[in-house]
Amino acid sequence: SMMRDISGVSDLERALGKFMQTKDCIVVPGNTDESSWVKYELGRACLNHMKDHLKDQNTIAVTGGTTIAAVAEALTTDFSNKELLFVPARGGIGTDVKNQANTICEVMAEKTNSNHMVLYVPDQVSENIYEFFKNEPYVFEVLSEIRSANIVIHGIGEALTMAKRRKTSEEDMKKIVEGKAVAEAFGYYFNENGEVVHKVQTIGLQLEDLDKIDTIYAVAGGESKAKAIKAYMKIAPKNTILVTDEAVSKLILKG
Ligand code: F6P
């Protein structure tokens, strides 16, 4: 019955929260790999939770990917009574414009009648170029907004899927494969133990900055992400709220 389904999900949330040792887990019914609307449900669940955790003024840093794009789709004008500024978490990772953090920020701002900033920084450039970029007045401003974000919404991906999507160089691909990466988040590639085996060189939020952020949403579902979610959650800051689906939750708990 419907009631049984609902309590089934909350049992999963409790079990998963305990397993992950994280602040909170939110589980939505279904399997993201099988039905694309589950991504939208992940988005709605994330936003529902976020609604109760907003301050009067919020800076929300977001990453790219199809899941976070679905979070943007699920946003409504309900959020317009609070001050929101959307910023991309990191510059330039990924080539797919539609699902890029910059584009997602724009959609989120539009949907909530609020503001956003963009960060266009190419990947894999030399140290000198980074120094130059960081001191550009606009970039400098975006970077300080990112660092003072009170909320982060990010995706988690399967390592090889992400490396291919990003047209990763042969040399970096080798690091990812030989390092046995299974997870990717924020441009960092992790092995099964949650150790970083490769990192995309770009400016913006760094992994170590996450500890200072009040509320972090890791939004990822689908059985294909089981290893990725498990690995990333090993090192995720304790203030991470995992928003995921039933199918992958069950798979992770099965061990
Ligand atoms: O490229 C941004 C990003 O958030 C990655 O860090 C993550 O691995 C990926 O997108 C997830 O993409 P998707 O939601 O499409 O699976």
Image (cartoon, helix red, strand yellow):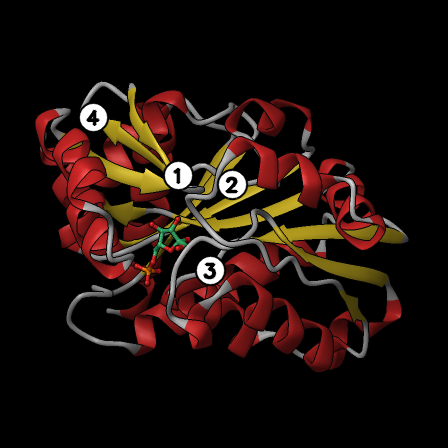
Q: Mark 1 points at which residue?
A: 200
Q: Nearer the viewer, mark 3 or mark 2?
A: 2
Q: Residue at x 59, y 34 (%)?
A: 128
What amino acid is at disc 1?
A: Val
Q: Which residue is drawn at 29% across and 55% down?
A: 221
**Hey, which quadrant is residue 206 in on the image?**
top right
Q: Earlier in the sequence, mark 3 or mark 1?
A: 3
- Which quadrant does the C terminus fall into? top left
Q: Earlier in the sequence, mark 4 or mark 2?
A: 4
Callout 3 secondary element: loop
> Total marks drawn?
4
- Please tell me in which quarter of the rendered image ligand 1 is found: bottom left
Please, is residue 195 above or below residue 101 in the view?
Answer: above
Q: Residue at x 24, y 50 (%)?
A: 168
Instruction: Locate residue 250 relative to residue 135 in the image: left or right.
Output: left
Which one is in front, 124 or 106?
A: 124
State whether residue 95 appears in this view. yes
Q: Is mark 3 within 8 Å of ligand 1?
A: yes
Q: For residue 191, which numbered disc appears in the image?
A: 4
How dense is the environment of label 2, judged by Cα within 10 Å: few (below 14), some, or many (20 and up)? many
Q: Mark 3 points at which residue?
A: 64
Q: Name the residue under label 2.
A: 202
